[in-house]
Amino acid sequence: MNEKKYPFVSNPRDSRFLTLRSLQTFHGRSRTGLYIIEGIRHVSRALEHAAPESIFLDPSVLSNRFGKRLAHRLHKDGVPGIRLSHQLYRDLTLASEPQGIGAVLRQNWTPLNALAPERNTLWIAAESVESPGNLGTIIRTAEAAGATGLFALGPDCDPYDPATIRATMGSLFSQKLIKCSPRDFSDWARSHKVAIVASSPAGLMDYKALRYRFPAALVIGSEKLGLSEQLLECADFVIRIPMKRGCDSINVAVATGVLLFEMASQRRGAHLNE
């Protein structure tokens, strides 16, 4: 097999290319339920969880041996695809050095009413994280800390944004993703006895002083406004990260990492003491 058997597209007005371009927008992703990924690492990790709807290639830069085998395998499995001119392919990637292989996948949202948290699980709930890079870093950190999934509680929290996906470094595919309102999230947490832990500079408790109980969900807010009053009021605990005088905040992704790993450490300790 040779990936050149895929049709070649060089016209920027070609409907096949325009469909791919539309998935770079929130509207296009919402309308179709699809999203795009680019790069060997992302495509390889995605295949561990789901089959792609289609792939797109730039043979002029697809030189990596593993990447070529990946393209060969997908073609052999009958996955539809196209070859793009170098310029069109560059229009679809945020990478400074594109790797020549990308894929279209279907978004995978877990319905809230089908979600029953297991004992000792750890979750993230993001109300409104505007920066795709921050959200992607949070998802990557969540996997590293052993979190199970992410609740997207606001329209500004889109884990399928291309910049978010790139920042996750493939961790997106290991996480359960749930889209719901803050009220539905708090009702779910209450009904399943999930402790809601809110992070706020105004929190009364040092994050290391709290003895966390599980299952638990760490709730984080936007970079500018923090958490809404609604989520602060429904939280079981509101914690803060103590800082030296003169500094009143740190990056939301950094703060999330600090809190997640403390919670994960306590969870491991509790498990060992059982």
Image: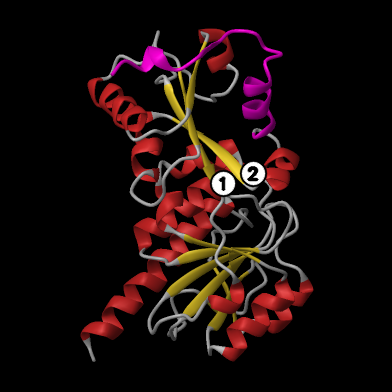
Is label 1 in a helix, a strand or a loop?
helix
Give the residue at the far right of this rendering. Answer: 229
Return the x and y of residue 248 as percentages of the image width and height: 64, 57
* Secondary element type, mark 2: loop
Q: Quadrant of residue 228?
A: bottom right
- Residue 186 position, x and y percent, is 66, 80
The residue indicated by pointer 1 is 134
Label 1 is placed on what type of residue?
Asn
Q: Is residue 205 above or below residue 26?
A: below
- Please give the range of residues in magenta: 1-23
* Label 1 crowd bin: few (<14), some (14–19), many (20+), radius 10 Å: many
Q: Nearer the viewer, residue 209 or 61?
A: 61
- Label number found at residue 131: 2
State how the image is colored. Answer: secondary structure
**Which residue is at the front of the view, 173 or 107?**
107
Q: Amino acid at mark 2?
A: Ser
Is 13 magenta? The answer is: yes
Q: Badge 2: few (under 14), some or many (20 or more) residues near its Cα, within 10 Å?
A: some
